[in-house]
């Protein structure tokens, strides 16, 4: 059975359950969504893969319950503003 309360679901620590590592209030992630980064630190998902995310402008990212993201190829969520 999967334990959604763990940070690392595997013994290699190359994957993380995103809900347990995301700090931004405007990023909402489902319980079993995980990110795999075999060539880097998966704990850096928010700082390296969610770009230009400004809560003050109403930006919001919602990722479902059973999503799998990988650094191979790179996954990026890019927010921007039209002026």
Image (cartoon, rainbow, N blue to C red):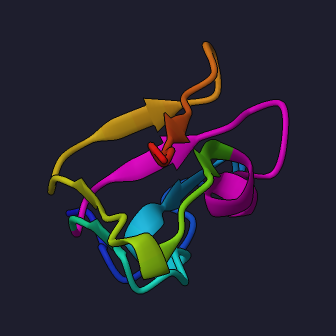
Classify residue 61 as left or right of residue 22: left
Classify residue 34 as left or right of residue 42: left
User: Which residues, given as a range, are shown in magenta?
Assistant: 31-48
The part of the image, by quadrant, that contains residue 67 is: top left
> How far from the left and from the top, in percent, is residue 36?
57, 39
Q: Answer above or below: position of 79 versus 21.
A: above
**Extreme residue toward the right, this view:** 40
Q: Answer above or below: position of 53 versus 27.
A: above
Q: Nearer the viewer, residue 54 or 24?
A: 54
Which residue is at a point 35% across and 37% down the rendered structure image? 68
Which residue is at a point 50% across and 81% down the rendered structure image? 24
> How far from the left and from the top, in percent, is residue 4?
30, 74
**Extreme residue toward the front, this view:** 83
Whether residue 51 can be seen here? yes
Q: Nearer the viewer, residue 36 or 79?
A: 79
Whether residue 11 can be seen here? no
> How far from the left and from the top, in percent, is residue 8?
57, 65
Q: Answer above or below: position of 72 versus 4.
A: above
**Extreme residue toward the left, this view:** 65
Which residue is at a point 81% across and 51% down the rendered structure image? 41
**Extreme residue toward the top, this view:** 73
Which residue is at a point 63% across and 22% down the rendered structure image? 74
Q: Is residue 40 magenta?
A: yes
> How far from the left and from the top, in percent, is residue 53?
54, 61
The part of the image, by quadrant, that contains residue 25 is: bottom left
Classify residue 79 as left or right of residue 41: left
Classify residue 46 as left or right of residue 54: right
Q: Nearer the viewer, residue 48 or 72?
A: 48
Q: Quadrant of the N terminus?
A: bottom left
Q: Is residue 34 magenta?
A: yes
User: Looking at the image, how many numbered discs can be counted on the residues?
Assistant: 0
């Amino acid at each position: 059975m999967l334990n959604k309360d763990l940070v690392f679901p595997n013994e290699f620590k190359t994957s993380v359950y995103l809900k347990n590592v995301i700090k931004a209030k405007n990023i909402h992630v489902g319980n079993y969504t995980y990110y795999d980064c075999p060539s880097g630190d998966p704990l850096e998902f928010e700082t390296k893969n969610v770009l230009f995310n400004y809560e003050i402008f109403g930006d919001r990212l919602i990722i479902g319950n059973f999503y799998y993201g990988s650094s191979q190829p790179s996954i990026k969520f890019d927010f921007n503003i039209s002026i």
